[in-house]
Amino acid sequence: MLFDRARVSRSTLDRAPLKDQSRDNAYWLTQSPNKRLEALELLRQLNYDYDPDTARLSRVHRPVKRATR
């Protein structure tokens, strides 16, 4: 799973006001598109508690009874 491989360096974390987003934008603009998409997928999996290895379509089919005309 993607967030099993993700590591956070606690030494580089700091607090900043929300209005100071220029450093975040500058960082992400230096990253490759693949790295950006990987980070986006990580956030999606963490936010929705999504596991791509177990999230599959059900293979159980049920017959549907329809009224005759």
Image (cartoon, rainbow, N blue to C red):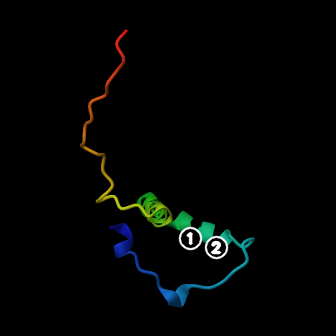
The residues tagged by marks 1 and 2 sit, at their Cα atoms, a distance apart of 6 Å
Q: Residue 64 location, x and y as percent?
A: 31, 28
Q: How many marks?
A: 2
Query: Where is mark 1, residue-wise?
Result: 27
Q: Quadrant of residue 4?
A: bottom left
Q: Quadrant of residue 68?
A: top left
Q: Is residue 48 left or right of residue 3?
A: right
Mark 2 Cα within 10 Å, few/some/many (few <14, many 20+)?
few
Q: Is residue 41 left or right of residue 15?
A: left
- Identified at 44% across, 63% down, the residue is 45
Front-lying residue, 10 or 1: 1
Q: Quadrant of the C terminus?
A: top left
Q: Secondary structure at mark 2?
A: helix
- Identified at 68% across, 70% down, the residue is 21
- Identified at 47% across, 85% down, the residue is 9
Give the amino acid at mark 2: Arg
Q: Is residue 53 left or right of residue 20?
A: left
Give the amino acid at mark 1: Tyr
Q: Quadrant of the N terminus?
A: bottom left
Numbered badge on residue 23: 2
Q: Is residue 2 left or right of residue 46?
A: left
Mark 1 Cα within 10 Å, few/some/many (few <14, many 20+)?
few
Q: Quadrant of residue 5?
A: bottom left
Q: Secondary structure at mark 1?
A: helix
Front-lying residue, 32 or 48: 48
Q: Residue 10 location, x and y as percent?
A: 51, 88
Front-lying residue, 51 or 44: 51
Q: Residue 28 location, x and y as percent?
A: 54, 66
Q: Is residue 12 above or below residue 39?
A: below
Q: Are marks 1 and 2 in contact (CB under 8 Å)?
A: yes
